[in-house]
């Protein structure tokens, strides 16, 4: 009743497994992974250094732009104060009420023209500063995009 099938009792053969070949493949895989990791690390390190330099340049440019704005603002305030004092002196020497009104009208027109010119100057300075501030980061970004296209 319990007859064993002879095929069942025979040992099952497994395909041969060459451990040396497997270890060689594993070693090659590990070396390739290590090399790729080193390359990625080198690229990341270079990118981080470039970004750090760009940030430092941006802060330096921001400092320069801030100093330029401060200088221009002080010059504008000084010019306005001097013009106001000169105008008050001129008003004190007015001979009639009509002269006073004419002086005031002329002064206001000139001050408006000066204010428009000053705003144009500030606008040009702002645009130049914005371009200068953005340039280092823009250069780093363009370099990174170029490297990605190559890779």
Image: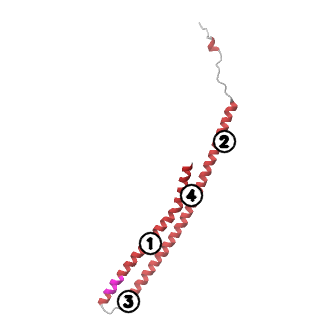
Q: Do the residues labelled 3 and 4 touch (CB within 8 Å)?
A: no
The residue positioned 30% from the left and 92% from the top of the image is 96
The residue positioned 45% from the left and 80% from the top of the image is 78
12 versus 124 height, above or below: above
Mark 1 or mark 4: which comes first in sequence?
4
Check disc 2 and report the residue beneath it.
Answer: 31
Label 1 element class:
helix
Residue furthest to the left in view is 98
User: Residue 90, image x and y in percent?
Assistant: 38, 89
Check disc 1 and report the residue beneath it.
Answer: 122
Check disc 4 and report the residue beneath it.
Answer: 51
Check disc 3 and report the residue beneath it.
Answer: 90
Task: Quadrant for the N terminus, please.
Answer: top right
Residue furthest to the bottom in view is 95
Judging depth in this view, the residue of 128 and 99 nearest the camera is 128
Q: Is residue 78 left or right of residue 43?
A: left
CA distance for labels 2 and 3? 87 Å
Category of crowding for the residue at label 3, using alpha-carbon neighbours closer than 10 angstroms: few (below 14), some (14–19), many (at least 20): few
The secondary structure that dominates the magenta segment is helix
Q: In this view, does 146 lie to the left or right of 93?
A: right
Q: Do the residues labelled 4 and 2 touch (CB within 8 Å)?
A: no
Q: Give the range drawn in magenta.
A: 101-107
Label 2 element class:
helix
23 versus 57 height, above or below: above
CA distance for labels 3 and 4? 57 Å
CA distance for labels 1 and 4? 30 Å
- Name the mark nearer the viewer: 2 or 3: 2
Mark 3 or mark 4: which comes first in sequence?
4
């Amino acid at each position: 009743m319990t007859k064993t099938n002879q095929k069942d009792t025979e040992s099952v053969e497994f395909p041969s497994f060459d451990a040396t070949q497997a270890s060689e493949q594993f070693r090659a895989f590990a070396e390739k992974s290590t090399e790729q990791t080193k390359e990625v690390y080198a690229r990341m390190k270079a990118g981080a250094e470039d970004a750090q330099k760009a940030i430092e340049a941006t802060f330096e440019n921001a400092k320069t732009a801030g100093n330029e704005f401060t200088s221009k603002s002080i010059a504008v305030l000084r010019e306005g104060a001097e013009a106001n004092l000169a105008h008050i002196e001129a008003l004190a020497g007015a001979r009639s009420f009509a002269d006073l009104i004419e002086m005031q009208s002329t002064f206001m027109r000139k001050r408006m023209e000066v204010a428009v010119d000053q705003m144009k100057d500030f606008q040009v300075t702002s645009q130049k500063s914005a371009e200068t501030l953005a340039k280092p980061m823009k250069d780093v970004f363009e370099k990174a995009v170029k490297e990605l296209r190559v890779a």
